[in-house]
Amino acid sequence: MCAFVVGATLIGLALDRAVALPGQYVLGLLCWCMLGLALRSATRAERVQTLVVIAVATCFEIIGSIIWGAYIYRHHNLPMFVPPGHGMVYLFGLRLSQTAWVRTHTRLWIGIAAAGLVAWAVIGLTVLPRADVGGAVGCIVLLAFLLRGRNATVYASVFAFVAFLEIYGVSMGTWAWQAHVPGTPIPTGNPPSGIAAGYVFFDIAAIALAPWLLARWERWRRHTPQPAPEFVADTAARGPGERAHDPRPATPTPVAEPTL
């Protein structure tokens, strides 16, 4: 699954660079299809979590890019491959955290992610052409989740992929970050070092909301009236020439509307 997501990202963003806006719609449709394939092996809870990530992330994408303008996509739109792309990012982090190596070396994996995060923040403040103050703030938030979060292995795995995704996406020209956080004098990198903190919020929403949504769905199913089973005549119990007795009334019984 992780290799599938990485390969789809490498090829998809390279193709996006070479096509016009109509071609981008085709890439978006293909990305939705690939997400559907990826979800075939997922559990019901994982599918709900992925859909929650897509819903929450899409809202933040509209606010952050279209309204606020913190980053701009190549065609000044929200590409159709972005929402399913967020779902695939989550699946990558989830599947990587479930590998035998990460489960065996949990503390080491979290430590590697934390060290990489801190190194990126320091480089952004000292070496890179644009002082990445905004990214450093995000790094502090993400570091707290890595060190204290209940699902730190998922967050570390998501950070590993987001670091690759942001650097690759910016280098391909798919999107670009503004030099300053809009409306503030705070400089930020392209990409910001702490951008993965935003993805962690998507993951937290998914992990927290998925059980509640599943419980609501099961409750709704239990209270939804089920159609009565069809009557089947027991011919073996009848004697020759006897008519089968149909217990159903001659007139149809009105069915009550389900209570909302």
Image (spheres, rainbow, N blue to C red):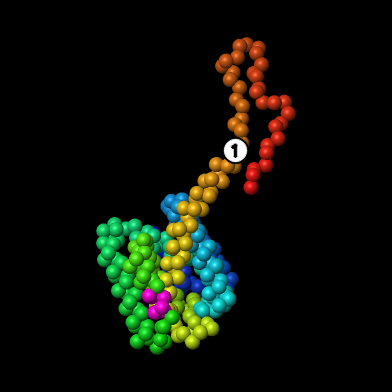
Numbered disc total: 1
**How crowded is the residue under tag 1: few (<14 C-alpha within 10 Å), some, or many (20+)?**
few
The residue drawn where x is 62% and y is 11% is 240
145 in relation to 72, above or below:
above
Task: Describe the element under mark 1 as helix, strand or loop.
Answer: loop
Quadrant, the N terminus: bottom left
Residue 123 belongs to magenta span: no
The residue that appears at 65% across and 19% down in the rendered structure is 245
**Which is more toward the observer, 110 or 166?**
110
Residue 174 image point, x, y percent: 49, 76
Q: Position of residue 70 (x, y in %)?
A: 51, 79
- Residue in the picture at 46% in, 53% down: 211
Which residue, as the protein is rendered here, is positioned at the far top? 240
Q: Where does label 1 land, which residue?
A: 226
Q: Is residue 70 visible?
A: yes
Whether residue 114 sits left or right of residue 11 in the image: it is left
Q: Is residue 78 visible?
A: no
Mark 1: which amino acid?
Answer: Gln
| Part of the protein shown in magenta | 135-140
**Among all residues in the image, which is located at the extreme right?**
251
Residue 142 versus residue 27: which sits nearer the camera?
Answer: 142
Q: At which x and y percent is residue 53?
A: 48, 62
As drawn, 41 above or below 127 = above
- The chief SS type of the magenta part is helix
Which residue corresponds to the image point at 51% horizontal and 84% vertical from the top-left? 184
- Check if residue 137 falls in the magenta segment: yes
Q: Is residue 252 left or right of residue 72?
A: right
Residue 99 in the image: x percent, y percent? 32, 58
Residue occupying the far bottom of the picture: 129
